Image (cartoon, grey):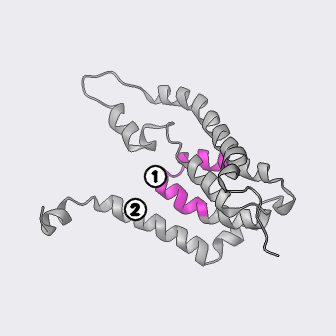
């Protein structure tokens, strides 16, 4: 394939969308907007780390209802989560990792993920309906959130990603 053909077949709307969400994440981080937004979060350092991570996981899991792209969810959420984690005394790596893992949940609506949309409407083949996806999500969303939280609190620390923010002496 030549350059001209490659440029014609490139998914430009998707690439522009990805660039815009990455720019939004960078802007949130570098402008100080993430820190400002985090200042409104109640609890701060008085909140236990498990509770902070539970909030991050729940918000990140539910974010697919507002931001349909997994990359967009992480581009927007990670700068906010990192700033909030530092303020709460939680390891920002663990918080960002938990947010990104939870943001991968995307089974509630056909538009929530490309494969779900692709297989929702196969001509001549019965598939699933939006109602089926809602019922599935009623089970999978809490299960996914619980598993991500379990891994963030019990497994990832064993692999070198502690929950608590380690301060240097």
| Residue under the image location 54 percent in, 57 percent down | 74
Q: Residue at x 42, y 27 (%)?
A: 129
The residues tagged by marks 1 and 2 sit, at their Cα atoms, a distance apart of 9 Å
The chief SS type of the magenta part is: helix
- In magenta, the rendered stretch is 56-78
Residue 97 in the image: above or below residue 83? above
User: Seen in the image, is 110 located left or right of residue 28?
Assistant: left
Is 145 one of the magenta-colored residues? Answer: no
Q: Quick check: 20 left or right of 42?
A: left
Q: Residue furthest bottom?
A: 31
Numbered tag placed on residue 98 in the rendering: none
x then y, percent, for residue 148:
64, 43
Label ID, residue 69? 1
Q: Sequence-wise, which precedes: disc 1 or disc 2?
A: 2
Query: Which residue is nearer to you in this view: 37 or 25?
Result: 25
Is residue 64 covered in magenta?
A: yes
Residue 12 drawn at (x, y percent): 29, 62
Q: Marks 2 and 1: in contact by CB < 8 Å? A: yes
Give residue 114's quadrant in the image: top left
Q: Secondary structure at mark 1?
A: loop
Task: Name which residue lies at 13% across and 63% down.
Answer: 5
In the rendered view, tell whether residue 97 sits above or below residue 118: below
Residue at mark 2: 17
Image quadrant holding the C terminus, namely bottom right
State the image coordinates of residue 150 (x, y, percent, origin top left): 69, 41
């Amino acid at each position: 394939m030549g350059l001209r053909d490659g440029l014609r077949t490139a998914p430009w709307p998707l690439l522009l969308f990805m660039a815009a969400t990455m720019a939004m994440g960078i802007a949130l981080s570098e402008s100080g907007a993430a820190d400002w937004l985090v200042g409104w979060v109640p609890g701060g350092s008085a909140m236990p780390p498990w509770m902070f991570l539970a909030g991050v996981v729940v918000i990140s899991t539910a974010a697919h209802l507002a931001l349909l792209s997994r990359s967009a969810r992480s581009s927007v959420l990670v700068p906010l989560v990192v700033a909030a984690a530092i303020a709460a005394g939680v390891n920002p790596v663990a918080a960002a990792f938990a947010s990104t893992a939870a943001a991968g949940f995307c089974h509630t609506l056909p538009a929530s993920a490309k494969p779900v949309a692709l297989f929702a409407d196969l001509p001549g083949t019965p598939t699933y309906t939006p109602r089926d996806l809602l019922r599935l999500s009623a089970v999978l969303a809490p299960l996914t959130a619980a598993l991500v939280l379990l891994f963030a609190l019990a497994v990832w620390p064993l692999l070198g990603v502690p929950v608590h923010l380690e301060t240097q002496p």
